[in-house]
Image: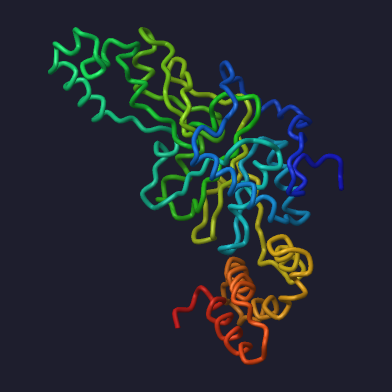
Amino acid sequence: MSDWLIYRGAGAPHDGIEHLPPPPPWRDFDGGPLVAPPAALDPSSERRLGVQRREASHHRPGETERELVNAALYLRRPLLVTGAPGSGKSTLAHSVAYELGLGRVLGWPVVSRSTLRDGLYDYDAIGRLQDLQIARAIPAAAESGTSAGADPADEPGGGIGRYIRLGPLGTALLPSARPRVLLVDELDKSDIDLPNDLLNVLEEGEFRIPELERLSGSAPEVEVLSDDGAQVTVRDGRVRCRAFPFIVLTSNGERDFPAPLLRRCIHLHIPVPDKERLAAMVRAHFGEGADGRYEAVIDRFLDREPGDVRAVDQLFNAIHLTQKAGWTDEDEEETRRRLTAELMRPLDRTR
């Protein structure tokens, strides 16, 4: 394997990220003081990291996939990953994060109503107003110093930091020594404006929070909550990365993207897996020799009409059911075949 590969797709963690060369001069960012490295702060974070480890250990990228991932790492560019549903587009982000020790993947699942601000930060203006009204309505409690009457307006910046939480994209752009991994899932489902709205943030590696900029004279440093659930400091209402995040934008090909976005990305298309790659994936999930035991199921998965769409998850479901049901004798063979056919029904057919 070539020595230039930082991400090797081996499914095991290593310190390769420490050997990543400096960025190109036009992709060198100068964010502020470093924030603390990400940590698993709660049980839900631990569960997500566990899922990440499992997905990464089962992912088997091809040569082109490994090379383009490394191109994105070297050039500090987003990776636009296209392919059929279930081809492993999202799993790739978890594989990179786990192998290179970059913490949990920051996930932004895009829907038709998603806006750029959803990814950057959320400001609960209504919650802040309600708390101010409650605090000022109970002056006695406020004078006694109890929490029920504490006036948020007495805090630096009027306590505004308690009502701002950075989104997954905003958290990925915090200044850190190592890049975070951000998964922007199914960008093709977004409103037509979102890909264009992303352009400046992806190019500049920064964004501003107007609510904090207006207070920068009186409160230049405000603590807000990150997507990880940690308190982080925003200075002068501006967030700028130091290590550009490894960003995976996935698309099922439901729409075309504007040329300005495409030129800012490295494009990776994951083709429908052939029998060799499916066999490797089955071995990774079900153990050595599983591809031989379930060769007939793999062949059934690959036996499709032109244009039929199937996801690899369907193959895994069929094999798992075959394992757990313990179908072995000839009387049960027809049941196995019938249910396998139902589980691997093409996704673009309803009958």
Q: Is residue 260 visible?
A: no
In this view, 61 is above or below 308 = above
Q: Position of residue 105 (x, y in %)?
A: 57, 41
Picture layout, residue 279 above or below residue 350: above
Disc tally is: 0
Please give the name of the residue rendered at 73% of the width and 56% of the height, measured from the top-left corner. Answer: 60
The foreground one among 292 and 171 is 292
Q: Percent x, y for residue 251? A: 54, 55
Horizontal and vertical percent position of residue 156: 35, 11
Residue 47 occupies quadrant:
top right
307 and 40: which is toward the camera? 40
Determine whether 153 is above or below 285 in the image. Answer: above
Identify the residue shown where x is 58% and y is 72%: 310
Q: Quadrant of residue 209?
A: top left
Question: Measuring 60% from the left and 39% from the top, which residue is drawn there?
Answer: 181
Q: Is residue 22 visible?
A: yes
Residue at the spot x=69%, y=56% of the render?
Answer: 58
Name the colouring of the figure: rainbow
Question: Can you give x and y, in whole percent of width and height, for residue 70 in the image?
Answer: 73, 42
Q: Depth check: 91 or 273 in front?
A: 91
Task: Work out which quarter of the rendered image holds the C terminus and state it.
Answer: bottom left
- Whether residue 140 sits left or right of residue 27 in the image: it is left
Given the current orientation, which residue lies at the most extreme bottom position?
331
